[in-house]
Image: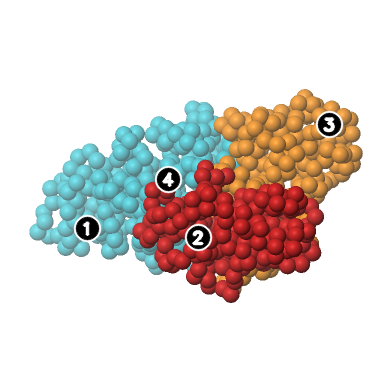
Chain colours: A red, B cyan, C orange
Amino acid sequence: MPAAQADPARPDPTPDEGRTVLDARDVSRALTRIAHEILERNKGADDLLLLGVHTRGVPLARRIAERIHSVEGHRVGVGSLDVTMYRDDLRSHPTRGPQRTDIPATGIDGKVVVLVDDVLFSGRTVRAALDAVSDLGRPAAVRLAVLVDRGHRELPIRADHVGKNLPSARTERVGVLLEEIDGYDEVRISGVGGPA
Amino acid sequence: MTVVIRGASLLGETTADLTVEDGVIRDVGTADLGGATQVIDADGLIALPGLVDLHTHLREPGREDAETILSGSMAAAVGGYTAVLAMANTSPVTDTAENAERVHDLGRRAGLVDVHPVGAVTRDLGGQELAELGLMARSRARVRVFSDDGRCVDDARVMRRALEYVRTFGGVISQHAQDPHLAGPTACCHEGELSGRLGLPGWPGIAEEVVVARDVMLARHTGSRLHVAHVSTAGSIEVLRWAKAQGIAVTAEVTPHHLLLTTDLLSGYDPTFKVNPPLRPAEDVEALRAALADGTIDAVATDHAPHARHDKEHAFVDAAFGMLGLETALSVVSTVMVREGRMGWSDVARTMSTTPSRIAGLEDQGQALSVGSPANLTLVDPTAEVTVDRADSVSLSRNNPWHGRRLTGSVHATLLRGVPTVLEGKLA
Amino acid sequence: MKHLLSIDDLSVDEITTIFETAAEMHDVQHREVKKLPALRGRTVINMFFEDSTRTRSSFEIAGKWLSADVINISAKGSSASKGESLRDTVLTVCAMGVDGLVIRHPASGAARQVSQWVDAIVVNAGDGMHEHPTQALLDAYTLQRRLGSLEGRRVAIVGDLTHSRVFRSNLQCLTKLGADVTVVAPPTLMPSGIEPWSRAAGFATSYDLDEVLPKADAVMMLRVQRERMAGGYFPSAREYTVGYGLTKERLAQLQPDAPICHPGPMNRGLEIAADAADAAQSAVLDQVSAGVAVRMSVLYHLLAGEETAS
C-alpha cells in the first residue's frame, strides 16, 4: 500500500545543504513578474484559469491569482490538478494515492488554462498534466508557468512564463520550499550525495 | 536364516538379545553370535511387537495413482507396521469375497506387511443392503473387520442387523460415527468458532457423539462387538467410558493426527489438513490423549489416506478428505504420549500392536516378545529427533500434514516373520 | 498489500487510503471522460466461478475506467466436477499473461488458495461464505460519507449471518473503523461459535431486532435466500419477515437519518420492505455507485505501482 512518500522528482531539500538560489524576496518578485506576464500575454484576466500542479504548484497558483487580483481587481479561477494517474513512471515507484483535483464549477472548456508548477525539469510532469487536462475538457489554450526552469528536458516542452532560469547539472537537486507547506520561501540547489 | 537382534530393550523394560529363526523368536537372552546370518545392533533401541494398523486406505484397486498395495505396504513397513487393515472404500468396493481375496493376494505378493482387507458393511457402501459379510469371512482373506469407513452406517436398522450377523464368525463392525443429518453435504471441518469465522460448513462434535451413543446401545442389545473408528471428541469418550463400565463389547481407536493436530491449522484453508473426522479443538485433543493413556481408547490407528496432488488442489470444501499417516504414526505417539510421560513403551505395544491385533482377530500378530512367538518386530529409536519431510515419503502421495514438524522417536527396523523389511529407517 | 483477500489483511491506514483514493475516483464517475490512464497496458481478468452480474460489472467498469484491459471469464460449475483442479484452472488462465485476477468462487478460502498458486495479484470478489472485502469497503465508505467518522457509531447487521460473506467482511471492516456493531439473526442463522467470537472481536449479538433498531445509527440488511427454509433454518418467509425483516413498522422505529444498506439483490417483502428500500435514508444506490469508486481505488493501489515483494 502507498506510503506517504515524497515525490523523488521533487525532493524535500535539506536546509543546511547546498546554496540558496532564490530567497523569499526573489520568489515574491518572480511570482509578481509571472502574474504580469500572464496578464500581458492574455490581454487581461478574462477566461483565465490557473491550475496548480500538486504539490507545490497549488500554492504557487493561488499566489499568482492573488497578484492578478491586486493588479486587475479581477478574481481569476484557481484549481488544483493531480497528475499521479497520468505519470509515465507509475510502475517504477510504490503506488501513491492521488491528491485532489479541484476544478472550479465553471469547468475548463473554452478557458485559457495556465498550468502552474514549481520546477520544470524533464517535462514529464507537464506531459502528464496536459493529458489530465484533456480528460477534463477542451480549453481554448493551455500555457505553462514555472517558478524555476532547470533545463534537461526529455520532451519537446517549454514554459511560457519562467520565474528563474537555473542552469544545473542533471545530478544536482533543486528544492523549492514554500511557506504554505515548508514554513518559508526559498529555492536551493545542492550537489550530488544527498539521499537518493 | 538366523537374525540376532543385539541388546534391544524389550518394551523399554528389560534388555536382551533376540534370536530369530524361520520366522519365529527362538531365543530371548544372550545370543550366540556365531550362528547368526545377520546381526542387528539394537543398543539403545526399543523392541516392540510389529505394529498393526486397524485403519489404512491403500487405494488399490481404483486409485493406483494415489497409492498401491505395494507402495502402501512400503509406507507401512517404514512406519514399523507388520500388518495393516485395508479399508473397503476402493473401486470396486471390497464388498465381495472375490474383491477381498484380490486385496489379500496383492498384499501377499508385495510381501512387506500382512494386508488384511476390511469388508464393506453394506453393498457398494450404499448403507442399505448388507454386503456378503459371511462369504468374505469364509474367503481366503478371512475378513473379520467390516466397515463402510468414509461413510457412516447411518440407518439404525442396518447397523443392528450387521452387528447381529457378524457375531457368528467373530466379526466386528468398525463404525465411522458421523450422523450425516447433523451437517450439510459440504461439511468439511470441525464446527466451532473457527468454522464460523472462516465460513466453512462444519460437522459438530455432536454428529459423532449421537452415533457412538446409539451404537453402544445397539452393541449392548445385540451382544456383538462394536469398534468405533477414529474417535475425535471428548463427548464420544464420555460415552465410551460409560459403555465400557457397563461391560458393553466396544473398542475404539484414535488417529495420530487427532492426538496432535488441532482445528486452528485450517485458518489458511490448506486442504492438507482436511480430514474426516475433522481436526478438533485442543480440549478434544487433550481428552483423546487422556483416554488413550487410561485405556478408554484401545488403539491407535492411522487412517492413512493418500490422495493424488490434483485431488487436494481444489477449493477447501471441494478437496479430498484425508492425510498420510503410516510412516509417522509411531513418531507422533512417541512424541505426544511417551516423551510426555503419559505412556510407556509397553502401552505403545498394547495400543499399536497387541490390542489392534486382537480386535482384528489376527493370530500371528501382536504377540509377546517371547520364545515361540512369530518374529514380527519393530525396533524403535526412542531419542531420535526427526524433522518430517514429505519428499522423503515412500507413499505415492504427498498430502502429509506432518511436513516440517519435529518429532521424537523413529522406527529403526521392522521384521516381518523374521525377515527385515526395514533397516536403519530405510526399506531393506 | 500484495492481494486483497480479506479485510483482515488491511490496516486502518490502508483502509483510509483506499477511501481517499476512492473519493477522487468518485469524481471521475461524474466527468464526461470517465477514464484514467493509470492501468494502461495492464490486464485484469474477472474470473467468476459463480454468477454475479453486479459485482462483475462493477469490477469491469472499475478496471476499464482505469484503462486496464478487462476480460471476463465465466468459470461456473465446480472445476472438481469437470476433473480439473482449481489450481490447474487458474494457472491455465494466468499463463496467458495476467496482471490482476479478480476471483469470485462459491467456496470459502478459494481466493487465498489461488493467491498462493499464481503470480498475478488476486482480488477476492467473494469466496463462499467467507469474505467479500470490496463490498465491505464500499459499505463502510458509503456510511462514512453519510455519517462522517464511524468511531462509536452503532451499526446493526441483520439477517442470514451464517451464510453471509458480506457479514464477515463488514464486521471486520466496521469494527476496525471503530464502529459499535450488533449482529441480529435468529439462532439458526447465527454462525457457529458466535459467542466466543463476539467476545474476542468485541461486537454484540441479539435475537431482538426491535430492541436494537431504535438505537442504531445505521442498519445493514442481508439477503436471505428462500432455499434456507428447506434447510430448516426458519419455518416460513412470513415468520422471518415478522421476526427479522425491516418492515414498514420497523422503519418508523429507525432514526430518520440512519442509512439503510443492503448489498443486493434485495428480496423486497422478505428481509426488506419496499418502503424501507426506497426510503430517503436508504443508501442502496449510493452503495452501487461507491462500489465502482472503491474497486477503482483497490485496483489502482494493487496494480498501478511497482511490483512489491510479497
Q: CA distance from mark 1 to mark 2?
A: 85 Å
Instruction: Please tell me whether residue C135 is drawn above or below residue A192 in the rendered image.
Output: above
Cα–Cα span, label 1 and label 4: 33 Å
The residue singled out by tag 2 in the image is A9
Label placed on residue B21: 1
Frontmost of labels 2 and 3 is 2
- Chain letter behind tag 1: B
Mark 3 crowd level (few <14, some 14–19, many ≥20, 10 Å Cα): few
Please provide percent x and percent y for residue C211: 77, 24
Find residue B324 and report its horizontal and vertical position in percent.
45, 55
Find numbered disc 1 in the image and state the secondary structure of the residue it sits on. Answer: strand
At a point 70% along the width and 60% down the height, the residue shown is A39
Name the residue beneath numbered marker 4. B256
Residue situated in front as seen by the camera: B400 or A24? A24
Looking at the rendered image, the disc whose residue lies closer to the viewer, 3 or 4, is: 3
Q: Are marks 1 and 3 on the same chain?
A: no
| Residue on which disc 3 sits | C256
Decide if residue A22 is on the left or right side of residue C266: left
Residue in front for this viewpoint, A32 or C199? A32
Badge 2: chain ID:
A
Q: Amino acid at mark 3?
A: Pro
For the question of whether residue B408 can be seen, the reply is: yes
Q: Is residue C53 visible?
A: no
Classify the position of the C terminus of chain B by image quarter.
bottom left
